Image (tube, grey):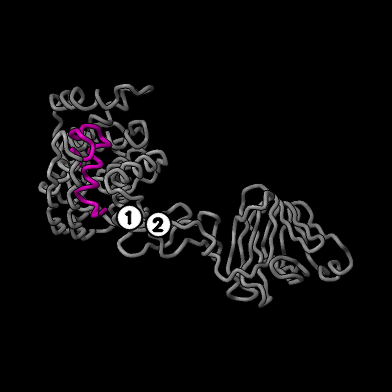
Amino acid sequence: MKKFLVVTVLALFLALPVIAATTDFVADANITVEAVDGDVADVNMIILNGSTAESWIFSGGTFTVTNPGTFKVGSSNSSVLSIKVNNSSGTLKACANNTSLGTSYVTLPTTADTYTVYPSTTSDCSTLCATQTGASTYYQNDGTYTLPTCGVATCSGTYTLSAASASTSTTCNPPAVSGGGGGVVGGGSPATPATPATPATPATPATPTETPATPATPATPATPATPASASEQIKNIVAEAATIAGRNVQQVLAAVKAMQDAKAEASASSKYTTPLVSGLKNVTAEMKAAITNFVNYGTPTTKILGAGERAGVVNSYKSAFGKVPSTESEWSDAIKIGNGRWPTARSAAAEEKAKVEFKKVYKKIPDMQQPNDNAAVTVISYGLRPGNRNLNSERAAIKSFKAIYGHTPVSALAWDIVRAIAYSGAKR
């Protein structure tokens, strides 16, 4: 790689209207680029020692970098509150606060493109991140926020981070939905049981000639179970997903410390797997075997669920995503649903459908910043299973469902609506 050694850079900048680095540029020292324009005009920017790129150019106040490798730019000018980077389409892609003059820097994206670097008066780059529900702070890597979706660094209140460590893709899981078979949290060590929810007041069912009954007042949300460790649970779920997706029944049995039962497997396949894959294309024998193993034997974090409820978890996944889980990541999301956690993948269609159903039940548009509304939409969208079940709340919720919809719940979506009524705490 050819190196570009700067000796008399400042003199060159003053003499020439256009300055361009050679191909395969490497900065052997800090390089000052003078008179750069942005939110503030005519300020000095600094290419930091060790920066690499195919090339960079300064012309008429505009500072651009083509195909950066590790390319870092700072400024010692106090009027520069932050440093921004746009791609060739003019879209803001990165921003760093200039909190330490001459030392703070923005790191350019490594995706091939030509980027414009400019000084900014924005005092806090995190305000440019796309808003994410439950976020307290946004993720930055060595001072640089990747825009527009920065990823969440920390979550507020009872929201929890979607992964063991923050990154550009992390989000916040909503407050745990308490009250049903799989356990909202936990994984390694069992969670402390949640305080049961106060039962909802049952609705009076409507007669055929009456206006449908007002839904039952939702149950008072249960006190969430104390998590053994959220990050530990995620690790356990990922490991369990690898075991199920591997379709090796012996590994599944070892994980749950069970003996193989061929008769039970055949029954689970006939009763649950066959209906679950009905109507779907490209479902292999291996995929069916994985579903049967999950339904019949479960995993360490879903053993508390019965076979029928585990089949329901797969059905909720199918309802949200239009397919049954196959890969490790898809099984990880299915197991997260069984543990009352947001799946990593998202279904915009399922969430929009859930908001429509929410409005039918609660006679209002959901406020996604309000934890109970958010929890209700999430449960309806993905079928998150609650922690400690409250059968009185569920019975009241079923009556409310029948009063609203005129029939008993049958489909995966219908049962997810029942769970939302019973456990989310959302109110009209």
Where in the figure is residue 52, as x and y percent of width and height? Answer: 68, 57
As helix, strand or loop, the secondary structure at mark 2 comes to loop
- The answer to which of 261 and 194 lies nearer the viewer is 194
Considering every residue shown, the one lying at the far bottom of the view is 78
Q: Is 377 part of what is drawn in magenta?
A: no
Asked whether the viewer can see residue 187, the reply is no
- The answer to which of 295 and 174 lies nearer the viewer is 174
Say if mark 2 contacts mark 1, CB within 8 Å: yes
Give the number of the disc on residue 77: none
Q: Which residue is mark 1?
A: 174
Q: CA distance from mark 2 to mark 1?
A: 8 Å
Residue type pointed to by label 1: Pro
- The answer to which of 181 and 368 lies nearer the viewer is 368
Give the number of the disc on residue 133: 2
Residue located at (47% from left, 61% from top)? 139
Name the chief secondary structure element in magenta.
Answer: helix
Residue type pointed to by label 2: Thr
Q: Which residues are magenta?
A: 401-428
Where in the figure is residue 404, as x and y percent of width and height? Answer: 22, 40
Where in the figure is residue 4, as x and y percent of width and height? Answer: 77, 59
Nearest to N terminus: mark 2 or mark 1: 2
